[in-house]
Amino acid sequence: QVQLVESGGGLVHPGGSLRLSCVVSGFAVSRATMIWERQVPGKERELIAQIETSGGSTYADSVKGRFTISRANAKNTVYLQMDSLKPEDTAVYYCRADFMAFSGQGTQVNVSS
């Protein structure tokens, strides 16, 4: 059974940092392209980062240079390190594999002074 559990969200001031985690069961993260997305109510879900089986990563322009995606194969977990956070980063953040149509329940990130 495939399951993804995101965590690590919260309230942070502008300029602050958070690290999101996505614990995966049912398949090996090392064998899939893993994706982080985010969604603001009323807007389409935005793909912001992905890490390929090779370890290569790509980012949306909106987060490039501030966010870093990584994985820990032994823990079957994918991370999203978010630095220099801005109010416009406020959203629910989700992870999934590229072959999946669904994600976990998401974790809320609020960036506000």
Image: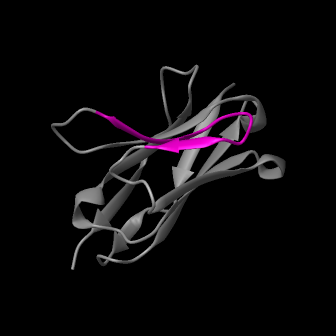
In the image, residue 2 sits, relative to residue 41, either above or below, namely above
In the image, residue 27 sits, relative to residue 65, either above or below, namely above
Q: Is residue 46 visible?
A: yes
Residue shown at 39% from the left, 43% from the top:
60
In percent of width and height, residue 34 lies at: 60, 36
In percent of width and height, residue 12 lies at: 35, 75
Q: Which residues are magenta?
A: 45-59
The quarter of the picture where residue 79 lies is bottom right
Residue shown at 66% from the left, 41% from the top:
56
Drawn side of residue 70 relative to residue 111, left or right? right
In percent of width and height, residue 32 lies at: 69, 29
Drawn side of residue 57 relative to residue 10, left or right? right
Frontmost residue, 6 versus 82: 82
In percent of width and height, residue 89 lies at: 30, 58
| Image quarter (top left, top right, bottom left or bottom right) of the C terminus | bottom left
Q: Is residue 90 visible?
A: no
- Outermost right residue: 74
In the image, residue 62 sits, relative to residue 86, either above or below, namely above
Residue shown at 69% from the left, 48% from the top:
77
* Predominant SS along the magenta part: strand
Magenta includes 48? yes
